Amino acid sequence: MNTSLFWISRLGFSRWLRLVLCAALVSAVIPAAHAEQNPYTMIEGVSQKLLGVIRTNAQYANSDPQRYYSAVEGVLNPVVDFDFIARGVMGRYAKQATATQRSRFTSTFRRDLVATFARGVANFGDLDVKVVNPGTMPSGNRVNVLQEVRSKEGITKVSYTLVRNRAGQWKLINVILNGVNLGKTFRSQFSQSMQTYGDLDKVISNWSAGEDVVDKVS
């Protein structure tokens, strides 16, 4: 059994997906990533900020979930390139979609992903994360940053893909957990949904990353 399947079978996919989302987005709490900022330092430094937000707001997860989701979304929006990720998830269907459909899917994808992530990490305030072999400031506009996530289940290695946009900000666009590419997983889900529904509007209306991916893999 390869490493990816071992972790999925050991944790159960639902638990695994939550850990992926937590690890992938745990670095995404920073008001603005400046051009001078080292992406390795950014990921290392902001992890505790997100964990702090979880500790402070997770109490509303059941009593006022929208308040909790909004608090999480507020710290993710500045650094996660949801537009880029959503286009990638749509794949070849993005060219077939209208501007309105692409916008709708981006909004739906962001809302669903944030809610799934927020629910999954409500009890993860004690996670320990550490960047492995941090490097110097990249000369290019794309970098992969490797991080270790320590939990009760052990150590999981996660690779983040970040790109620097025209404004000089580093944006998170993908995550790979032990060889499992989350972006490709969601793109495959979107493609299968298109085969099922045969209609972009229906796929967008019925999109649920947290549930559909679990059903597909488990």
Image: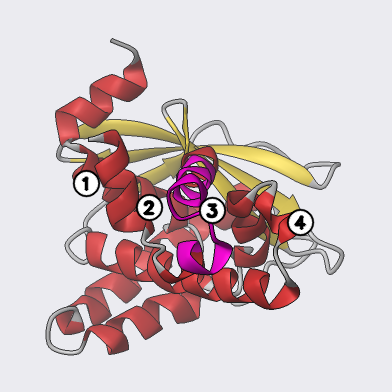
For the question of whether residue 103 can be seen, the reply is yes
Earlier-in-chain disc, 3 versus 2: 2
Tell me how far mark 4 sits from mark 1, CA to CA.
31 Å
Q: Does residue 193 belong to the magenta stretch?
A: yes
Earlier-in-chain disc, 3 versus 4: 3
Quadrant holding the C terminus: top left
Query: Neighbour class for label 3 at 10 Å: few (<14), some, many (≥20)?
Result: many
Q: Which residue is mark 1?
A: 14
Give the residue type at disc 3: Ile
Query: Neighbour class for label 1 at 10 Å: few (<14), some, many (≥20)?
Result: some
Earlier-in-chain disc, 1 versus 2: 1
Q: Are marks 3 and 2 in contact (CB under 8 Å)?
A: no
Q: Does residue 123 belong to the magenta stretch?
A: no
Give the residue type at disc 2: Leu
Q: Which mark is residue 95?
A: 4
Q: Specify the farthest residue to the front.
A: 198
Q: Foreground: 49 or 65?
A: 65
- Choose mark 2 or mark 4, whichever is in front: 4
Give the residue type at disc 1: Ser
Q: Which residue is mark 3?
A: 43
Per the image, label 2 sits on a secondary structure element best described as helix
Query: Neighbour class for label 4 at 10 Å: few (<14), some, many (≥20)?
Result: few
146 with respect to 151 (left or right)? right
Q: Which residue is mark 2?
A: 21
What is the x, y in percent for residue 118?
30, 68
Magenta stretch bounds: 187-203
Per the image, label 4 sits on a secondary structure element best described as helix
168 with respect to 75 (left or right)? right
Give the residue type at disc 4: Lys
Per the image, label 3 sits on a secondary structure element best described as helix
Q: Is residue 121 above or below residue 88?
A: below
Tell me how far mark 3 sits from mark 4, CA to CA.
33 Å
